[in-house]
């Protein structure tokens, strides 16, 4: 056989093999997932409730869980705007009837909450199950998720206080959501066919159609808004946010004294507090959800066992000393770090 | 010298930059003798030899600096290099009051001092939903499965070892948060381009087209028209991705960024790259891909990242970032050194393809000139533009207006608000205006 015909043969074999194994081109790469592996990770719940786990939970049980695990960020009634945007509020009985939250178009709504927006209760179930609570995601059992959701539905005046939410009735609840008819996909920011042709968008048609006019495009320049004075200084010294050489300089916004000083070094304890989310609820000199560190220091400074007591409170959580919003336990913190934090707070949190 | 350099108002280059603002005004008013007096005064105040040399020329030339007369540092002193100590001012920054929890916040890239189109990985903007982790790549897995068994031949698991054996592609793409410029929907709210447009970065990403993996699992593309991407962080962030984009070959499972591995803040060791689409869909720490026949309405496409319209409806699954541009030099919060020549520079981008043209106006949009586009013009990537400008010292309003290859022209604020109102939060691609006043200070304004 000539060399020529050999290479033809090789080519023919190669061609045949690529065509034959369309789904096994990459031999030795990847392996089949086991059913247990898929079950462990595939926890998503769709609007048609595909993926919903079986289970149930009552409003009462939900209230207990909410106060224990959720209220420190979201407030006892899911109304808090301190750490995250509010969950509950802004919806009316009429909205529940209509399926559209009136406040969204009337301008009467001071702030949107989760329940003023969401059109699919599956979304809230899925999110609580995968991501909550904040410091211990995926620690809730399905029954816990049903219960917490039942409590939120009760707060939203959708279900009575003796209600039990379950995989059997969650689809009925979805049909009662106050903003269930409040979504549209009629826009150009999703690719593919329009909704009329089996897709979900408008087929890619943009909202605006500006023209690239070059000369005498308008008779006057209409200024809609200028930078307010407070906003000029709200982002710190702008001179320090630009190079000190080159074609421009950063504009000096804060005056000499503050600007000249280098940014204060952050103490290791402050870093710990920031990294571990303490600063979300406690300010150095101000109450946020929990008391400011200055208030904690003032209250405990004359107590000989203050350090031991505060270490225990940070570790195990507490409630009642500063009001009804509980401090969650912080099991993720090391004992030595808690001690550092407490000593720092008692020394003035500098 | 340092003081006068940092003073707002018109700044003079050497040698007269030791003059105070009042003295500069006096000179401007014609009192030339003041200048001579000031030289004398400065000479007396400074060390005598320096003042003496100033008459002969620049002391930086006349007297060799220490870096010219001493031994420098050896190689590998800093095995992973870092920027000059003189560059500490251009860093990622948070916008005060925007978020109260660092783990669910944003840091903005310092666009005001960046060049070209590539974002250094250490300056790439950040947005996390439940904090970031530095994931052990040897324990990271990517699973591909289906909403039900009929949608693919077999669900599979890949290790990083395996993903990095597959044929990779490297492409340059921009990533922009859907909420970029979102603070400015109603009115001017923030002072600099870092905060107006800094949720924007552009990198060379290296990875495997997602289609390669879906083919490998035997996905039925007729039935499976949607893809769910899920992260491995605490939030296990999820978003629905259109299968059309996966089929185009553009969507990528990336591990490389600018020649090295992704940074932990940007999804190390694996993230989804969805060119042209808002950042939230570029799921970081990617651990799972699910194919399905319907979208999922996840939290970040049913509660957040939905665009409120004036009629009270929310737009859901808004994804593509439309054509947009911004001038970065000079920009808000900067002050021009003096009258005279400047190279005005900025960036343009479009989620629908390549940039075709960028026009710049110096009079608030009455007249426009086409800017130079240098360097590569790439698909769904930042594109740098430049234009010459001789500033006459009079007030001016600078704007840039981009057009992409579809012929779409970036809208004015007036045009955009007419359709979307002022409460949309997301997808603000309006023309940005910077006002220059006589002192040389540049500030953020909105032209309708």
Image (cartoon, coloured by chain):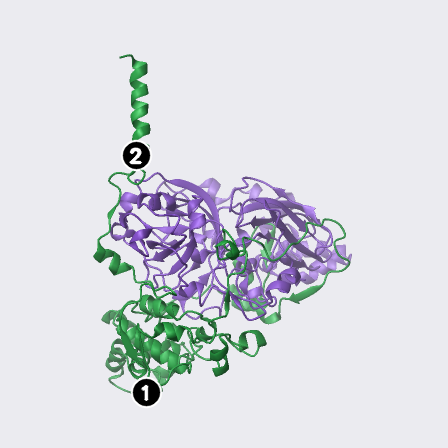
Chain colours: A green, B purple
Q: Residue at x 25, y 60 (%)?
A: A40
Residue A157: x and y in percent read 42, 83
Residue A321 disc label: 1
- The residue identified by callout 2 is A20
The subunit letter for the residue under badge 1 reads A
Asked whether residue A272 is in view, the answer is: no
On screen, residue A76 versus residue B13, left or right, reads left
Q: Chain of mark 2?
A: A
Q: Nearer the viewer, residue A219 or A338?
A: A219
The numbered mark, 2 or 1, whose residue comes first in the sequence reads: 2
* Above or below, comparing residue A293 to residue A49 in the picture: below
Within-10-Å neighbours for mark 2: few <14, some 14–19, many 20+: few
Does the CB distance between marks 2 and 1 fall below 8 Å? no
Image quadrant containing the C terminus of chain A: bottom left
Relative to B435, B137 lies left or right:
left
Q: Nearer the viewer, residue B71 or B157?
A: B157
Identify which residue is drawn at 42% across, 41% down.
B170
Residue that lies at the very extreme toward the front in this rendered image:
A197
């Amino acid at each position: 056989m000539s060399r020529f015909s050999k290479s033809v043969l090789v080519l023919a074999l190669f061609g045949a093999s690529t065509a034959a194994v369309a789904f096994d081109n990459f031999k030795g790469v990847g392996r089949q997932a086991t059913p247990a592996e898929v079950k462990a990770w595939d926890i998503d719940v769709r609007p048609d409730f595909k993926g919903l786990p079986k289970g149930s939970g009552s409003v009462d049980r939900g209230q207990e869980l909410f106060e224990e695990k959720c209220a420190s960020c979201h407030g006892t009634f899911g109304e808090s705007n301190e750490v995250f945007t509010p969950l509950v509020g802004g919806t009316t009985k009429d909205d529940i009837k209509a399926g559209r939250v009136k406040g969204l178009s009337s301008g009467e709504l001071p702030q949107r909450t989760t329940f003023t927006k969401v059109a699919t209760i599956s979304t809230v179930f899925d999110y609580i199950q995968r991501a909550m609570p904040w410091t211990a995601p995926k620690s809730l059992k399905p029954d816990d998720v049903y219960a917490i959701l039942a409590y939120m539905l009760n707060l939203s005046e959708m279900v009575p206080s003796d209600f039990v939410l379950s995989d059997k009735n969650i689809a009925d609840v979805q049909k009662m959501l106050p903003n269930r008819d409040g979504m549209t996909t009629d826009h150009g920011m999703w690719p593919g066919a329009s909704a009329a042709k089996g897709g979900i968008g408008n087929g890619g048609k943009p909202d605006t159609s500006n023209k690239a006019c070059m000369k005498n495009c308008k008779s006057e320049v209409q200024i809609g808004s200028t930078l307010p004075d407070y906003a000029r200084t709200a982002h710190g010294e702008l001179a320090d946010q630009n190079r000190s050489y080159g074609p421009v300089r950063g504009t000096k916004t804060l005056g000499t004294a503050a600007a000249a000083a280098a940014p204060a070094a952050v103490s290791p304890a402050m870093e710990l507090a920031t990294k571990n989310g303490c600063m979300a609820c406690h300010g150095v000199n101000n109450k946020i959800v929990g008391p400011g560190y200055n208030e904690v220091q003032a209250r405990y400074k004359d107590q000989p066992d203050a350090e031991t007591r505060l270490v225990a409170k940070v570790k195990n959580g507490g409630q009642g000393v500063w009001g009804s919003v509980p401090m969650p336990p912080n099991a993720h913190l090391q004992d030595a770090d808690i001690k550092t934090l407490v000593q720092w707070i008692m020394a003035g949190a500098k | 010298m340092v003081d006068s350099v940092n003073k707002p108002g018109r700044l003079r280059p050497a040698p007269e930059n030791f003059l105070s603002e009042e003295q500069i005004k006096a000179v401007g008013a014609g009192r030339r003798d003041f200048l001579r007096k000031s030289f004398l005064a400065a000479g007396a105040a400074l060390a005598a030899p320096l003042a003496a040399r100033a008459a002969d020329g620049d002391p930086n030339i006349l007297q060799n600096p220490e870096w010219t007369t001493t031994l420098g540092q050896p190689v590998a002193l800093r095995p992973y290099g870092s920027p000059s100590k003189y560059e500490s001012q251009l860093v990622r920054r948070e916008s005060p009051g925007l978020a109260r929890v660092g783990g669910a916040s944003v840091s903005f890239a310092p666009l005001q001092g960046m060049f070209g189109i590539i974002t250094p990985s250490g300056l790439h903007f950040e947005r996390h939903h439940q904090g970031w982790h530095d994931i052990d790549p040897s324990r990271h897995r990517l699973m591909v499965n289906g909403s039900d068994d009929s949608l693919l031949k077999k669900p599979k698991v890949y290790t990083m070892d395996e993903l990095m054996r597959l044929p990779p592609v490297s492409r340059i793409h921009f990533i922009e948060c859907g909420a970029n410029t979102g603070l400015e929907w109603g009115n001017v709210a923030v002072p600099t381009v870092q905060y107006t447009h800094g949720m924007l970065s552009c990198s060379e990403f290296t990875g495997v087209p997602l289609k390669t993996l879906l083919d490998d699992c035997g996905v039925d593309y007729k039935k499976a028209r949607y893809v769910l991407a899920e992260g491995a962080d605490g939030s296990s962030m999820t978003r629905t991705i259109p299968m059309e984009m996966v089929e185009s070959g553009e969507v990528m499972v990336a591990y490389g960024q600018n020649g090295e591995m992704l940074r932990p803040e940007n999804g190390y060791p694996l993230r989804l790259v969805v060119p042209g689409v808002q950042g939230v869909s570029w799921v970081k720490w990617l651990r799972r891909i699910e194919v399905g026949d319907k979208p999922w309405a996840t939290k970040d496409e049913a509660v957040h990242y939905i665009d409120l319209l004036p009629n009270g409806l929310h737009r859901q699954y808004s994804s593509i970032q439309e054509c947009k541009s911004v001038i970065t030099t000079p920009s808000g919060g900067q002050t021009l050194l003096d009258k005279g020549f400047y190279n005005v520079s900025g960036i343009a981008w479009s989620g629908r393809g390549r940039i075709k043209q960028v026009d710049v106006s110096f009079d608030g949009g009455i007249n426009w000139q086409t800017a130079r586009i240098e360097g590569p013009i790439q698909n769904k990537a930042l594109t740098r533009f430049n234009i010459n400008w001789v500033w006459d010292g009079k007030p001016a309003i600078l704007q840039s207006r981009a057009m992409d290859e579809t012929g779409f022209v970036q809208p004015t604020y007036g045009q955009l608000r007419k359709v979307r109102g002022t409460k949309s939060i997301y997808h603000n691609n309006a023309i940005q205006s910077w006002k220059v006043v006589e002192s040389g200070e540049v500030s953020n304004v909105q032209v309708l």
